[in-house]
Amino acid sequence: MTESTRFAGRRVAVTGAAGGIGQAIVERLLGEGAEVYGLDRRGVDTLPHGAVGIEMDLGSPESVASVVARLYAEDDRPVDLVNSAGIVEDNVPAESMPIEQFDAVLGVNLRGVFITCQAFGRELLARGGGAIVNIASMSGNAVVNYPQSQSAYNTSKAAVTALTKSLSVEWSPRGVRLNALSPGYVDTPLNYLKADMHDTWKRDIVIDRFATPAEVAGAVAFLLSDDAAYFIGSELLMDGGFSLR
Ligand SMILES: NC(=O)c1ccc[n+]([C@@H]2O[C@H](COP(=O)([O-])OP(=O)(O)OC[C@H]3O[C@@H](n4cnc5c(N)ncnc54)[C@H](O)[C@@H]3O)[C@@H](O)[C@H]2O)c1
């Protein structure tokens, strides 16, 4: 765990906190002194020690609103936001994808991110500012993955970046700074079901390995920090060189 006090006194909520990347973000921010709320629709009782786990479904505006109300009920300090929750459940050729599957992926990855940005962003605007980091993906704007078909996922991630830019123009002049982080392949459960594809993917990763969740967490911490004050609506790509080949 990185030990520093960079985020002492700051409160940060992390969605998808029970996931591979979310857990690493929680750990990193705790290690740098933040008070961290880990939000997920499952597994919030096994978060790293020191985090407050709260069950939340970002597909439900009511669920998100009640969590936001709880976070501000006894403490008025701003709560920054990291959106790490996401699903990739669409390894199906586009011509045969049921529309329900497309909706499900966009429902979490795009609609859910809008809902959380809106609910948390509103409170930050009312308190003079804060920071939001949305995890997009290299699959949004930099590459189209191969050999799997994931048109819904890729589209949702391009949209997360577009949303981040749009909200930046609306909110950054009022102190709410948003950025998107776009990782390449990361060693997390999201990819475990596709183990037969790992060799194909690695052929295009210039440094021949997946990112670790901790490396992603380090980039999130940077974007949340004051060192990134001039990053406004940026998409930061960290893909081990995958998109260069
Ligand atoms: N792993 C990768 O290779 C990779 C690469 C690029 C981007 N990403 C993105 O990084 C983020 C985190 O991915 P990960 O690898 O940690 O995945 P993961 O599957 O390990 O974790 C995702 C978490 O999101 C939670 N979640 C899903 N839907 C939810 C909902 N409706 N409400 C609340 N929580 C919900 C899940 O319960 C899970 O704990 C995702 O947005 C993913 O698209 C991952």
Image (cartoon, rainbow, N blue to C red):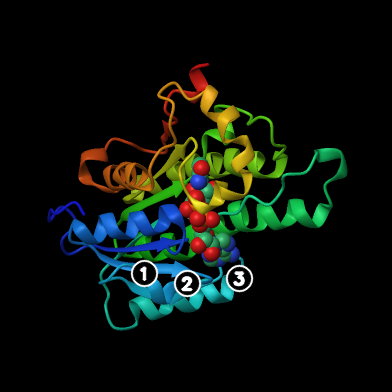
The kind of residue on which mark 3 rests is Ser
Counting from the top left corner in percent of width and height, residue 48 is at: 31, 67
Q: Secondary structure at mark 2?
A: loop
Check contact, mark 3 vs mark 2: CB within 8 A: no
Q: Secondary structure at mark 1?
A: loop
Q: Secondary structure at mark 3?
A: loop
The residue identified by callout 3 is 60
The residue identified by callout 2 is 43
Residue at 26%, 57% in the rendered image: 29
The residue identified by callout 1 is 47
Residue at 42%, 52% in the rendered image: 21
Q: Residues within 10 Å of mark 3 (few under 14, many from 20)?
A: some
- Placement of 88 over or under 63, stated as above or below: above
Counting from the top left corner in percent of width and height, residue 76 is at: 27, 74
Q: Is mark 3 within 8 Å of ligand 1?
A: yes
**Inter-mark Cα distance, 1 to 3:** 22 Å
Q: From this viewpoint, which residue is outermost toward the bottom?
A: 74
Q: Residues within 10 Å of mark 1 (few under 14, many from 20)?
A: many
Q: Is mark 2 within 8 Å of ligand 1?
A: yes
